[in-house]
Image (cartoon, rainbow, N blue to C red):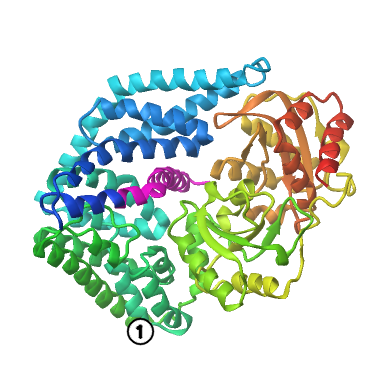
Amino acid sequence: MSEGKSLKLGVQKFGNFLSSMIMPNIGAFIAWGLITALFIPAGWWPNQALSGLVSPMVTYLLPILIGYTGGKLVFGNRGAVVGAIATAGAIIGTNIPMFLGAMIMGPLGAYLIKKFDQLVDGKVKPGFEMLVDNFSAGILGGLLAVIAFLVIGPTVDVVSKALATGVEWLIHADLLPLASLFIEPGKVLFLNNAINHGVLTPIGIEQARQYGKSVLFLLEANPGPGMGVLLAYCFFGKGNAKKTAPGAAIIHFIGGIHEIYFPYVLMKPLLLIATIIGGMSGVFTLITLKGGLVGPASPGTIIAVLAMTPKSFTSFTANIADVLISMTVSFLIASFILKVDKSGNEDLEGATKKMEALKGKKSSVSGVLVGAREFDPAKVKKIIFACDAGMGSSAMGASLLKKKVKAAGLNIYVTNAAVSSIPKDAQIVVTQSELTPRARDHAPEAYHVSVDNFLTSPAYDELIDQLKHGEKIQAEKAIESEDIFEDEKILKKENIFLKKSFSNKEEAIRFAGQALVDSGYVNPSYVDGMLARDQDMSTYMGNEIAIPHGTENDKKDVIASGIVIVQIPGGVDFDGNKVRLLFGIAGKNNGHLTILSKIAVVCAEMDNVNQMVGAQSANELLAVINQTIKQHA
């Protein structure tokens, strides 16, 4: 993998993590923004008593929610509690809203309590678990709160003031429009939430607290540039792109789902020029007319923009002009590009897949059932459409699916959620292709459907047809055999290696890969693909296991499906996580999924992992797997 690609993936992951702390709490930000817009002295209905809500909400409520959410992302509810305690120290140690401090202390507190739990795992005497859990969380949380009060809060205070000063300088130097050079391309690379909620919103909140509004809330959320591109397709596009552009324009402008226009830009990358210049024109207008919002407009719909506009004719004029001018400039440039471009490259589906490739996705329109014998449509009462943050694309997908469910006369509840918050009673989970593996981890008993094109995915109609006609959908032979070695060609006993030790994860992955090569499952070049896959995205799966495998491009090197198991009693480090069981896999035509799904069921229980790590023979290790499979059959 090239250094540039690694850097891009790292930035994406970091940006997505930052935005994932903010987006689940957008409702609280909007509540604060509305209260500010309504009750402050310059608001719609000034009220001195109710305006007293503004400062405590922005000072305490919002940062603690961010710290709690960041902690939960790292280590569930236990991490969330410690993260919130640690965040409180940063809040009390400064005089500004501590959003950046919360983004630091929330995940840090969760990470440290996670490491503590791993350290004492198996060492706490029975009956003392609750005592150790509560006191460790309290002691560590308290220590971190003190450190945050003395160090993190004051440090972030200095950094925040420096950032604010830099933004102020850009504004006064009339250079802020140049930010569109980075914001608009970043949006199409799916960094929109990271840019908006991870960077602009925290600084904008502080500006709004001081001045009553901030232009930063409109830099990324402005629907004008994307709307201009979609309107150009409505008039000058061709084929499927022209047909779908009107619907996409409504979803984008009224629904605020900006992701909908990204494939249209990627069909003709020159259209980035239209969005950049359109964005710059809008920002220039915003600064010149002194516009801005009192809070974040999320989602980026024209309705949210107007709702967050301060009560003044000047502000409304400036913000509406910002949207209209950016839309007009973008439309004119995009129209020119579409009219002079004779390439005829308007394959919307291909562009969607290209967008997914930029995000690290794979295109798929298939359902995969994990953890159940079959899927009975007659018993389905709930469908969840999940995305990374539980907003944006999942809200749009759920809306489209609701209409199809209603039109089919089905009495099924459809809603959206974040992948990390999929309800336990979800029966069908629909996700974007790259998120399906994570969704399976959170809802292993559900039927999972992967989609690519939000507007026209055939997976929707296939699913509705199956539900309507009540046809039972068979899983890929998941958990049907009581003996994991029914097909010994895939997993041979001689490919179970006991009591191994490695100095690093690369060495462990190479060992597993060479075992696959020696058994005739793969060509030697597949091993490099396994290393590249782990570098791209860690193959650590939790519960001290890792499942290294090749990338999509390495399938050509797979001769036959095969699995090897490597026991590492002393453990080996996988990006800060200890791995004691490693499953090296190679799949051809999904022939390995039967065994892999069974192994996933077994490894979901830490006691089983410990037994396999302690096994003294291949037969003993297999007995643990087979016994668990029989219990779940």
Residue nearer the viewer, 205 or 28: 28
Answer whether residue 214 is visible to the viewer in this image.
Answer: no
User: In terms of depth relative to the viewer, which is nearer, 406 or 279?
Assistant: 406
User: Is residue 25 part of the magenta span, yes or no?
Assistant: yes
Q: Quick one: label 1, few (<14), some, or many (20+) residues within 10 Å?
A: some
Q: Considering the whole magenta stretch, tell me its main secondary structure.
A: helix
Q: Which residue is drawn at 75% across and 46% down?
A: 596
Residue of label 1: 236
Q: Where is residue 371 in the image (x, y as percent from the top left)?
A: 74, 50
307 versus 526 height, above or below: below
Per the image, is 430 magenta? Answer: no
| Tally of numbered discs | 1
Three-letter amino acid code of the residue under disc 1: Phe
> Who's the residue at 43% across and 71% down the image?
267
Q: In which quarter of the image is residue 10?
A: top left
Relative side of 3 to 36, left or right: right
Q: Position of residue 249 (x, y in %)?
A: 37, 74
8 to the left or right of 578: left
- Front residue of 170/109: it is 109
Disc 1 is placed on an element classified as helix
Relative image position of residue 261 (x, y in whole percent): 39, 68
Residue 115 x/y as whole percent: 54, 24
Is there any visible trace of residue 375 in the rendered image? yes
Placement of 95 over or under 191, stated as above or below: above
- Residue in the image at 36% along x and 58% along y: 187
Q: Relative to 294, is 543 above or below?
A: above
Indicate left or right for 617 with 511 as reference: right
The quadrant where residue 585 appears: top right
Give the residues drawn in magenta, as a range: 1-30
- Name the image quarter holding residue 148: top left
